[in-house]
Each structure stands twice: as C-alpha cells, then as structure tokens.
Image (spheres, rainbow, N blue to C red):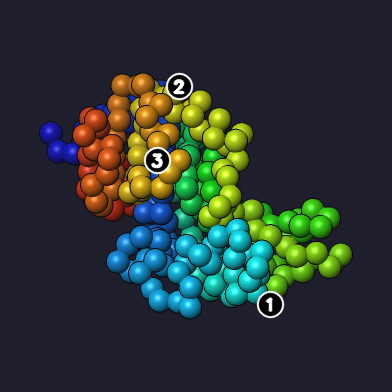
Amino acid sequence: MDKITALKEIVADGKNIVFFGGAGVSTESGIPDFRSQDGLYAQKYAYPPETIVSHSFFVNRTREFYDFYREKMLYLSAKPNAAHLFLARLEEDGKLKAVITQNIDGLHQAAGSKNVLELHGSVHRNHCMRCGKFYTAEYVKNSSGVPKCACGGVIKPDVVLYEESLDPEVISASLKAIAAADTLIIGGTSLVVYPAAGFVGYFRGRHLVVVNKSATSADAGAELVINDSIGEVFSRL
C-alpha cells in the first residue's frame, strides 16, 4: 500500500482527529520559515532574528523591532494553500476537532477552520499597551516607525516573543485536544521548538502520522511517516 492510500485510510478511520502544525504548513503560501536554509535565521541582520523578536528587544529597541517585523513577519497578501483548505474541509465534515498551530499568520482561519489554537499568537491581533484598543495587522503594516494608538500608547502585536510565556489557556486546550484525539497528524514542523514540541507526548490515541520534509523526533513512534511537502500530500487526499 502506498503512503497516500494509507493516510486516506487513517483519515477515514479517525473520528476525533487533531492536527499539530508548524512553519512548513505556511511556506507553500510564500511565508518563509525560520529554520530552513533560506529561512529568517539563515539571513544576516544587524542583530540575530532571535534577538530582534524578543520581549526585551521590543521594549528597548521598539522601532528596530517594527522595521524587522513589518518586512519579515507580516505577509498579509499570503493565501491559504492545499493543506489549510484540506484541514478546513475535514473540520467541516466533523472529523477534525482542532488545529494546533505554531504559526501566527491566520491562514487556517482564512481557509475556514474554526477551532484553531494559536500557540504563538497572531499578527492579526494588536493592542495598545496603554488603553487596550484593538488594531488590525493592516494598520500596523501601513504605519511607520513605532505604531501608536490614538491615546498615544505603543501598539504591541499579540505574538509570543522570545522571553514571553505561552498563553496557559491555549496550552490547556491544546493538551486536552491531543489527549482526547484518536488520530494525531503532525505536519510541517521540525518539533524543535519547546514547550510546543513536547505536547505530542500527551497523545494516547490509535493513529500517529507525521508529514514533514525532514525527520522529526516523533517519527520513531509514528504509524505513518511521509517525508514530503504537506501541501502536496494533502492535495492528494
């Protein structure tokens, strides 16, 4: 049996499927990942990207943070690809119960997914640090320098920066979803970012599937491993 057929059978058998995804889900929509050879971490800046997208850098060098953020993290013209669209259809069919994503681009929601747990936040939510007023990603993208609220406060994106903690409610919901799943599909993630990568250890279901271009730490315990583009794989289901 070829691997696509095997995956089709696993999806057909699953009644409580959870998808856990990372940057590889969005690269086919034109959003670069952080750790590939061509990713953000391989490029040269005045400061390492890890430093720029840290809480302390945001506080102390806010303008430089936003120069980088607008150019390298706001891809507002990106569209959902075959992976996003397949998962939205699977949820609509009642089989997929949750999408747990490390991405901040909002493409799962754009594709139609409803129950999306965003571990690292979203570029589409931005709030004034003084009064709490909401601002869109477009407002931030089109601003210059440090984006300011009408009240004069600095606007901060609702993304989890280095040195910041994940939202405990999102963590709890993610672990609950994984623990209750009969099928866990891990896709487009190298499983090297913690604590998120450790979440898969809570899975106790029947089918564990990994779809990723490179090897991951979950491969050894998986029923099925497909080393290929997730958009390509999901477009054939």
In the picture as drawn, the residue positioned furthest to the right comes out as: 151
Give the SS element for disc 3.
helix
- Few, some or many C-alpha atoms within 10 Å of disc 1 (few <14, some 14-19, many ≥20)? few
Q: In this view, does 137 lie above or below 208?
A: below
| Residue type at the position of mark 2 | Ala
Q: Give percent across and percent down for residue 119.
A: 53, 44
Q: Which residue lies under the disc numbered 3?
A: 197
**Three-letter amino acid code at disc 3?**
Ala
Secondary structure beneath dot 2 equals helix
Side of 58 relative to 15 (left or right):
right
Q: Report whether 173 appears left or right of 138.
A: left
Q: Residue at x 64, y 53 (%)?
A: 158
Q: Is label 3 or label 2 in front?
A: 3
- Residue behind mark 2: 180
Label annotation for residue 145: 1
Q: Residues within 10 Å of mark 3 (few under 14, many from 20)?
A: some
Q: Nearer the viewer, residue 210 or 194?
A: 194
Residue 70 visible in image: no
Q: Distance between the residues labelled 3 and 2?
A: 18 Å
First reached walking from the N terminus: tag 3 or tag 2 = 2
